[in-house]
Amino acid sequence: MTRPMALDTDRLRLREVLAAEALELREGRPGGLEWLGGTPGEGSREAARMLTGAHSAGLHRPGWGMYVLVRAEDGLVVGGMGFHGPPEGGSVEIGFDLHPDARGRGYATEALAALAHWALHDTGVDTVIATTTHANTSSQRVMERVGFARRPDHDGQFVYALTD
């Protein structure tokens, strides 16, 4: 069995989701993990669907998929974060979601900073992209706190970028 990659922050462990776990998560099942609220949120289920699709197509690269955000104090998964695929043309796209009860505590900022900076240390990555809806001001603030800068909108979405 492949050992998942992990990044530790002050309050979280970002642990890579394996393909077998993603099969469970995409169906809304906990995948052997203890989730705040009992099950993964819709954003994490969608990320798990993306991971299983990439894995089935032979396109998944370890490290460039989904991560669960495990709270150090109690071992509960408070959300998910990850890449929409491996780097392409020097950039990689990242997305995240948190359980509503975990929001407003800085977890998304802490995790995004760790994972985005990890990506920028890869020799093939000079830009990390994130998008959000115009109405999602919480995600916009998270990206801005991490240092992402607004770029021109694309397909009705706000686009943010962090460069090395």
Image: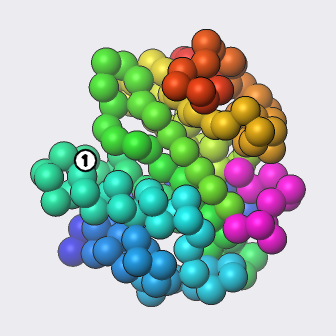
Q: Relative to residue 115, is residue 7 depicted above or below?
A: below
Looking at the rendered structure, the kind of residue marked 1 is Arg
Whether residue 83 is visible here, answered yes or no, is yes
Residue 107 located within the stretch drawn in magenta: yes
Compared with 60, 21 (above or below) is below
Q: Residue furthest front?
A: 156
- Which residues make up the magenta segment? 99-108
Mark 1 secondary-structure assignment: loop
| Residue located at (64% from left, 50% from top) | 111
Q: Is residue 150 left or right of residue 128?
A: right
Q: Residue at x 60, y 29 (%)?
A: 157
Q: Is residue 57 above or below residue 162?
A: below
State yes or no: residue 67 in magenta. no
Q: Return the residue found at the far top.
A: 152
Residue tagged 1:
61
Residue 63 percent across, percent down from the top left? 36, 49
- Left or right of 10? Residue 161 is left
* Closest to the observer, 128 or 117: 128
Q: Quadrant of the C terminus?
A: top right
Q: Is residue 149 left or right of residue 48?
A: right
Q: How many marks?
A: 1
